[in-house]
Amino acid sequence: MILLSNLISLAAGLCLFRLNYGFCDFYYWVSCKYLILGLALCVNSMFVLRSSYFLG
């Protein structure tokens, strides 16, 4: 769980770093956004699976 949140932070940090330093190409930003969304969905589904496992 901690590793995944670190990955999300790292991805977000890399995006912001690239944007701040002027490497602001649109396709990079879009792919970066989808990477973070995908990681967030992954973490979310893991939480849902884990909580339903404990409840069930």
Image: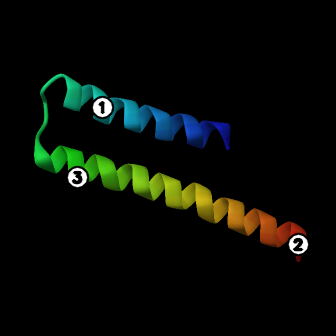
Q: Is residue 32 left or right of residue 40?
A: left
Residue 3 location, quadrant: top right
Which residue ends up furthest to the bottom in the rendered image? Answer: 56
Work out which quarter of the rendered image holds the C terminus and state it: bottom right
Between marks 1 and 2 in the image, the one whose residue lies nearer the viewer: 1
The amino acid on which the numbered mark 2 sits, given as a three-letter code, is Leu
Categorize mark 1 by other alpha carbons within 10 Å: few (<14), some (14-19), many (20+). Answer: some
Q: Which residue lies under the disc numbered 3?
A: 30
SS assignment at label 2: helix
Which mark, residue 55?
Answer: 2
The amino acid on which the numbered mark 3 sits, given as a three-letter code, is Val
Q: Above or below — where is 18 with respect to 26?
A: above
Residue depicted at x 28% and y 26%: 17
Q: Where is residue 42 in the image (x, y as percent from the top left)?
A: 55, 59
Categorize mark 2 by other alpha carbons within 10 Å: few (<14), some (14-19), many (20+). Answer: few
Q: Which residue lies under the disc numbered 1?
A: 16
Residue depicted at x 72% and y 68%: 49
Q: Where is residue 39 in the image (x, y as percent from the top left)?
A: 48, 52
Distance between the Cα atoms at labels 1 and 2?
A: 39 Å
Kindly indicate whether the residue at mark 2 contacts the one at mark 1 (C-beta within 8 angstroms).
no
Q: Is residue 17 left or right of residue 7?
A: left
Q: Above or below — where is 31 with respect to 44?
A: above
Distance between the Cα atoms at labels 2 and 3?
A: 37 Å
Residue depicted at x 13% and y 36%: 24
Dot 1 or dot 3: first in sequence order is 1
Q: Above or below — where is 10 with respect to 50?
A: above
